[in-house]
Image (tube, rainbow, N blue to C red):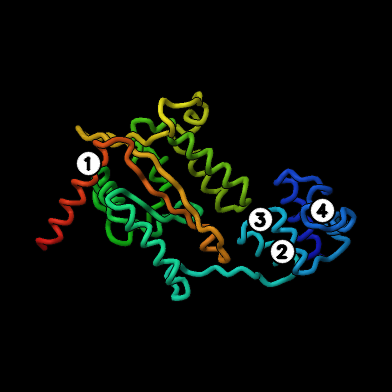
Amino acid sequence: MSQQRDFAASLRWWRQRKGHSQLELAGRADISQRHLSFLELGRAAPSRDMVIRLAAALDVPLRQQNALLVAAGFAPVWRQTDLAAPELAQIRYALDFILAQQEPFPAVVVDRHWNLLLANSGAGQLVEFLVGPLAPGTAVNLADALVAPDVLRPYLTNWTEVAGYFVRSVEADAAADGTTTTAELLKRLLAYDGVEAALAAPTGPTSGPVLPMLFRKGDVSLQLFTTIATLGTPQDVTLQELRIESFFPMDEETAQIFRNWSKANAAKAAQS
């Protein structure tokens, strides 16, 4: 009965968070509203297949689908595999291929909470130019690096606009996945100086088609925009939470700077 109550409360929470009525969710899951009502009241116990069907109808992420299964008394069905595991070799190959294709421009792979997992040489050269080289194995969280006052912020001339947009995207993530980890990330970002003001700043269209990231250090100016890609059909928690962020130059001057950095780096490597 305790497990039924846990599942019932979780199911009701997800349905309300997604903004569905019982009738809407019942229709999406192809069950009767009466059955759904009994499940939400804890008066009926779901089968494993019913938990998965309702989770899919609610578009619940795989990690949280496992949590619903556990709440209902079942073992998790979705694996969470380390990215370096042999069974993900072909996925890792695809990620490395994407990063390599983006050269000389930056590209990174992060998890759902913006912890850096992989980066190409272009990303390393950008970071080294702005803040200096990082020690091997240094843990990097791109959310903190972007929003905190002492990492990228001093060089990001339109930090207010970029930080406001980014933190709002983390707010959306927190609403979508309902995890304490994402909620804690959002809380940490909101606590940084200037973030509340950035969120309160007026928003509107910029002069260009996308919001750029405008970096400046000394006499060097860089104008970049980003794209974010995900895996199309993930069947693993780790893979569903991967994001591939690629940076592209907004102008030829920025593009040429990255090309020059790449040539200089190749020449240095050839001499060593």
Amino acid at circle 3:
Val
Residue positioned most to the left = 271
Q: What is the quadrant of residue 233 in the picture?
A: bottom right
In this orientation, does residue 155 appear?
no
- Quadrant that contains the C terminus: bottom left
Amino acid type, label 1: Gln
Q: Which residue is mark 2?
A: 52
Q: Residue at x 32, y 62 (%)?
A: 137
Q: Element at badge 2?
A: helix
Sequence-wise first label, 2 or 3: 2
Task: Give me the C-alpha separation between circle 1 and circle 3.
Answer: 43 Å
150 to the left or right of 79: left
Task: Residue at the far bottom: name it.
Answer: 86
Q: Are marks 4 and 2 in contact (CB under 8 Å)?
A: no
Distance from the alpha carbon under mark 4 to that under mark 2 = 14 Å
Q: Is residue 183 above or below residue 267?
A: above
Q: How many marks?
A: 4
Query: Would residue 232 be visible to someone looking at this image?
Result: yes
